[in-house]
Amino acid sequence: MIKEVIVVEGRDDITAVKKAVDAEVIAVGGFGINKKVIDRIKEAQKRQGVIVLTDPDFAGEKIRKIISKRVQGIKHAYISQKDGTKDGDIGVENAEPEIIIRALEFAKCEVKEKRDEFNVDDMIFFGLTGNNNSKEKRDKLGNELGIGYCNAAQFLTRLNNYGITKKEFIEAINKIDREK
């Protein structure tokens, strides 16, 4: 599994990256990059490191510069316009898995063991799935831990991929439970 969180522009890019490697991926939503997304990228950088892989076009470079300006110490992966073009459309989503792997290798990505510190039993035990207020609790906990809101399956993946410790998790759970 790739240690760093990979930052891409959109959902189709996520699909292309996940076809190539096992990694946590954040989509910025193109020029819709906002403070919430930047904060999530900062948290990812702090915990695991970040590799930015944007489209090889003007918009992709502009997004890359915005992220670089706001998040220090990130790595950059690049694909060529030739490797990212299909039927006149330019983007990471058009790159073959081998091209994406090579770009990440050139960016000096690190590999780590897949982590399974948290499991479905934890999600059920702490009320993060299966309860009427699970969605709200995941939202509060995601904000507290800096990993954002998502469905239960993705939340479990983020807990493991972002390197959240049991201690951090319990402290955050206790904090949001006290705030009720």
Image (cartoon, grey):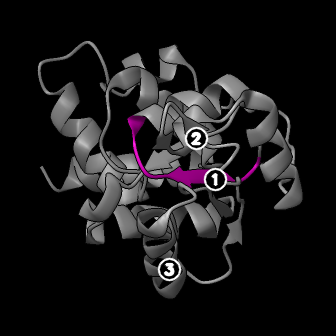
Whole-angstrom CA distance, mark 3 to mark 2, is: 22 Å
Q: Nearer the viewer, residue 85 or 36?
A: 85
Q: Which residue is mark 1?
A: 81
What mark, if any, has residue 26 been given in the picture? none
Task: Name the quadrant containing residue 100.
Answer: top right
Residue visible at 52% across and 45% down?
A: 91
Relative horizontal placement of residue 133, taking residue 35 as reference (left or right): left
Which disc, if any, is residue 85? Answer: 2
Q: Position of residue 117 (x, y in %)?
A: 67, 32
Mark 2 vs mark 1, CA separation in Å? 6 Å
- Marks 1 and 2: in contact by CB < 8 Å? yes
SS class, disc 2: strand
User: Which comes sooner in the sequence, label 1 or label 3?
Assistant: 3
Q: Measured from the top left, where is residue 85 in percent x and y?
A: 58, 41
Q: Is residue 9 magenta?
A: yes
Q: Which residues are magenta?
A: 3-11
Quarter of the image where the N terminus is located: top right
In front of the other: 168 or 163: 163
Q: Amino acid at mark 2?
A: Thr
Horizontal and vertical percent position of residue 47:
64, 62
Give the residue at x 31% y 56%. 143
Q: Decide which of 136, 1 is in the foreground and name it.
A: 1
Labelled disc at residue 65? 3
